[in-house]
Each structure stands twice: as C-alpha cells, then as structure tokens.
Image: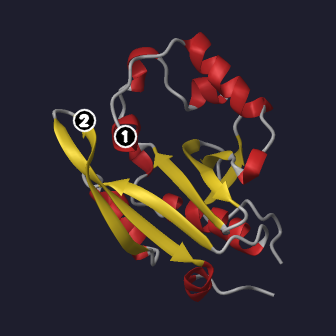
Amino acid sequence: MFNNFWIGEKVRLRAVELKDIDDFFKTGFEADTDLDKFCDEIHFPQSKEKMRERLESIIKKEPENDEFWWIIEDLNGNPVGNINTFSCNKRNGTFKYGIGLEKPYWGKGYAKEAIKIVLRYYFRELRYQKVNAFVYSFNEKSLKLHESLGFKQEGRLRRMVYTNGDYFDEIYYGMTVEEFNAIDPKKN
C-alpha cells in the first residue's frame, strides 16, 4: 500500500490554495506564458482580484461529480503545474482531464507521474473504466507524452482552435482501465 497516495517519486498533488495566486497562477501581463498558449489560446489579462475570485471558487467548491483541481508540486514544494478532471460520467465510467506544466519543468517526468497518480485514483478507487484527453495538434510534446503513456489515438477534429493566426486540430486520446493496469501494475 502507498504511504501517501498523492505523492510519487517526483511530484505530489495537493488541493489549490490561495497562495497559488502569487506562486503559480499568473495575472495581468504575466498571463501570456507558454503554459497559457499550450492550453488553448491567449487570453485577456485578468486582475489579481478576478483571479482571487476564481481561485476562491475552486477552493470552496466540494468535489462535485468527481471533478477536481490539483496543484502539481515537486518534492521540494515548488508548484510546477496543475491537473484537473472534468466531464466525469459515473454511469458510463468515463472522465477527462487537462494538465499544464510551466516550461522549466517540461521533459522531467513530472506530467507523466501526475497523470498516473490521477488515473490510479480514478480507475482503482472511483471505479472509472476509461479516460479521454484531447491535445491540440501544435502541442507536439503533449502528443508524445500521451503516446508514451500508452494512450490510443481515437480521433481528430479538424480546425477546432484558432490561436496565433492559425487553426489547429484537436487530437483525441483514450485509455481503458485494462490498458492502464498493463503500464501500471497493481501493488499489494
């Protein structure tokens, strides 16, 4: 059994806290970061007050329908990104997630481990049977990450996002609980 389910070899997942407005979530002109661009599009700047309201609503909200936001920290407590679940359907046993890491932490295995922790929880504790993720076609690192984890490409929707003067496709990936168990054997 795990000492602490939410801690891996490289990262720990924790709930969002108000301090994250200064440590992680960007406001104003700081918001135009690589993390924002790889999520979907470049957004209007937000005031610190608006970001605080958003974070407070995330913090106060009970995990409804198994949807949740985590901050990804390295083992020294430095926030490196976030991961969230959404579109959780208990009847069909399916869910989706999104993940974002700050650029200095790319390629170090943090995203892979954070995804595995969340999948382990949803498959083995909450009884979900399938996860879906979509990645924009311009995000080659995320495409490679999902393929390295064993996700199967299940579809492509053409020209679904417009950013930086171009249209890009959404690539849909899926993984079943059986496929996850093959890459992450259960520990007794």
Within 10 Å of disc 2 (Cα), the crowding (few <14, some 14-19, many 20+) is few
Q: CA distance from mark 2 to mark 1?
A: 8 Å
Residue 74 shows in this picture: no
Above or below: residue 129 compared with residue 109: below
Q: Residue at x 72, y 24 (%)?
A: 56
Amino acid type of the residue tagged 2 in the rendering: Thr
Specify the label residue 85 is tagged with.
none
Q: Residue at x 58, y 20 (%)?
A: 51
Above or below: residue 166 compared with residue 75: above
Specify the label residue 163 is tagged with.
2
Local secondary structure at mark 1 = loop
> Residue 186 sits in which quadrant?
bottom right
Residue holding disc 1: 40
Q: Residue at x 62, y 84 (%)?
A: 181
Local secondary structure at mark 2 = strand
Q: Which residue is more in the foreground, 75 or 128?
A: 128
Q: Which residue is more in the foreground, 1 or 128?
A: 128
